[in-house]
């Protein structure tokens, strides 16, 4: 299966190279919470990031390899890197790039240089991050032993887990960029609080969403701390890794297999998408190639609505599987898939390019509609629903998901994306939304 998935990835890329938590988006510029102000200086302890690896359970050498390297690895040989960044490695238990989730070391270096020099848009993006209340040093985590999420995003501990996952990532980024040790300490405090407390995520089918929506954000925070030299003890790193492997991954894996006991096409695309990005992220954090490949294979070949051929339902127009539902969930799904693609790209697998840049078509379609344009719509129907027209519900919402995609397709690849470019400019600097790490102006501008 792994060999088949990677061989298919080579063909797909070669052909083209050449939810649910409805917290209002802060992407329009006004802060969602209080202001933490500018950093108060560098405290002792963590020092500037970028040194050795903190508390490694298993270290990694080169990257996961490019597409060509992955294809060679599927046959048991080590190949050279393909068009994407990363070193050469095959499948199986091959090593990963670290840090290697949404941000790589070179990304952190680029962001830090821009912020320290006061270069735009990095400076504005960093100021926007500092305005967020979860990024303030007086933020306190609220861990639960058992988190419950039920339909409608209610349940004990659900909001707290979401907020703390956001906060851990925000503080990890602030430390990585500014070198202010107190932010590393705060991020570690948050992750340690949950890894020493949380034992289960329960509820109705929505329990799977809690695992999918929050797991990858926690993993992203841990990845930066672990591999940029934060003072995170090895036993604490190991405990956090067990949290990802024993609490989050079993739920995302189960959902991709069973879809909570329903038909494979019953749930909307964003459900699969959240499971995929967390499964992939856990795989990278834990150096577990099988989990990484599970997500890649499903994205390319899966039968559920989160696979790229189904999430972007119309490969010509870019109409999404959720376009007839509402625009909040439509953006949620493609935003999560973009995070999946960005992570895989850093590991040498260009999922962005799959099926002739199909994800970009979905983003362009959605952005055009959100900007007030008219878009074609073909009746969508499956066993659970029928949509005969695009939904105007949440048309005013702009989620912070566009800078990442703009900077990949336009800046890295030189592929035009006029509607994404216009929408990204309209909400710059990006804020955040509870379902997405956000702050793309800071993190992904290049």
Image: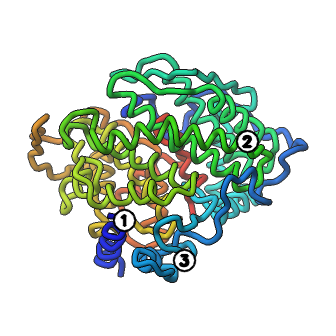
Residue 292 occupies which quadrant of the picture?
bottom left
- Mark yes or no: residue 133 visible: no
**Labelled pair 1, 3 in contact (Cβ < 8 Å):** no
The mark that comes first in sequence, 2 or 1, is 1
Front position among marks 1 and 3: 1
In the picture shown, does residue 215 fall above or below 289? above
Front residue of 209 and 329: 209
Q: Nearer the viewer, residue 240 or 206?
A: 240
According to the picture, the residue beneath numbered tag 1 turns out to be 2
Which corner quadrant holds the C terminus? bottom right
In the rendered image, which residue does mark 2 sit on? 235
Disc 1, SS: helix
**Crowding near the residue tagged with mark 2, few <14, some 14–19, many ≥20 C-alpha atoms within 10 Å:** few
Q: Quadrant of the N terminus?
A: bottom left
Picture residue at 52% right of the left edge, 64% below the top: 93
The residue shown at (69%, 40%) is: 171
Which of marks 3 and 1 precedes in the sequence? Answer: 1
Task: Give the crowd class for mark 3: few <14, some 14-19, many >=20 residues within 10 Å.
Answer: many
Q: Calculate the distance from the C-alpha at mark 2 to the C-alpha at mark 1.
A: 32 Å
- The residue under the point 56% across, 57% down is 287
- Say which of marks 2 and 3 sits in front: 2
Distance from Cα at disc 2 to Cα at disc 3: 30 Å
**Image coloring type:** rainbow
Who's the residue at 41% across and 37% down the image? Answer: 251
Q: Nearer the viewer, residue 35 or 382?
A: 382
Give percent across and percent down for residue 130. Answer: 68, 39
The reply to whether discs 2 and 1 touch (Cβ–Cβ < 8 Å) is no
Residue receiving disc 3: 88
């Amino acid at each position: 299966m792994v060999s088949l998935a990677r061989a298919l990835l080579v063909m797909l890329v070669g052909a083209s190279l050449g939810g649910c938590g409805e917290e209002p988006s802060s992407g329009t510029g006004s802060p969602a919470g209080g202001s933490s102000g500018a950093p108060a200086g560098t405290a002792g302890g963590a020092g500037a990031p970028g040194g050795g690896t903190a508390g490694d359970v298993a270290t990694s050498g080169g990257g996961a390899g490019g597409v060509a390297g992955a294809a060679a690895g599927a046959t048991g040989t080590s190949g050279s890197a393909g068009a994407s960044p990363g070193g050469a490695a095959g499948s199986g238990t091959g090593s990963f790039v670290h840090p290697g989730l949404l941000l790589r070391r070179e990304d952190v270096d680029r962001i830090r240089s821009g912020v320290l020099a006061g270069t735009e848009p990095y400076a504005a993006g960093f100021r926007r991050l500092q305005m967020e209340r979860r990024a303030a040093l007086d933020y306190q985590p609220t861990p639960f032993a058992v988190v419950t999420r039920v339909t409608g995003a209610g349940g004990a501990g659900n909001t707290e887990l979401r907020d703390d996952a956001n906060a851990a990532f925000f503080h990890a980024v602030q430390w990585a960029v500014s070198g202010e040790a107190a932010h590393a300490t705060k991020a570690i405090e948050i992750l340690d609080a949950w890894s020493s407390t949380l034992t289960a995520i329960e509820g109705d089918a929505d329990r799977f969403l809690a695992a999918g929506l929050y797991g990858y954000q926690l993993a992203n925070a841990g990845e930066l701390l672990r591999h940029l030299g934060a003072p995170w003890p090895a036993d604490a790193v190991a405990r956090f890794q067990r949290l990802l492997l024993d609490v989050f991954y079993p739920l995302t894996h189960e959902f991709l297999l069973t879809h909570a006991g329903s038909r494979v096409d019953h749930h909307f695309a964003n459900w699969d998408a959240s499971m995929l990005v967390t499964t992939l992220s856990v795989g990278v954090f834990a150096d577990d190639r099988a989990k990484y490949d599970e997500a890649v294979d499903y994205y390319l070949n899966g039968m559920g609505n989160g696979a790229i051929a189904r999430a972007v339902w119309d490969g010509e127009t870019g109409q999404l599987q959720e376009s007839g539902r509402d625009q909040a969930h439509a953006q949620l799904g493609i935003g999560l898939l973009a995070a999946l693609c960005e992570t895989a790209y850093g590991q040498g697998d260009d999922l962005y390019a799959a099926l002739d840049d199909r994800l970009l078509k979905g983003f362009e379609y959605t952005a055009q509609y959100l900007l007030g344009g008219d878009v074609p719509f073909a009746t969508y129907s499956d066993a659970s629903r029928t949509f005969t027209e695009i939904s105007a519900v949440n048309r005013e919402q702009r989620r912070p998901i566009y800078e990442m995609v703009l900077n990949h397709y336009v800046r890295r690849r030189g592929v035009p994306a006029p509607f994404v470019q216009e929408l990204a400019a309209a909400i710059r600097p990006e804020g955040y939304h509870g379902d997405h790490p956000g702050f793309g102006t800071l993190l992904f501008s290049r």
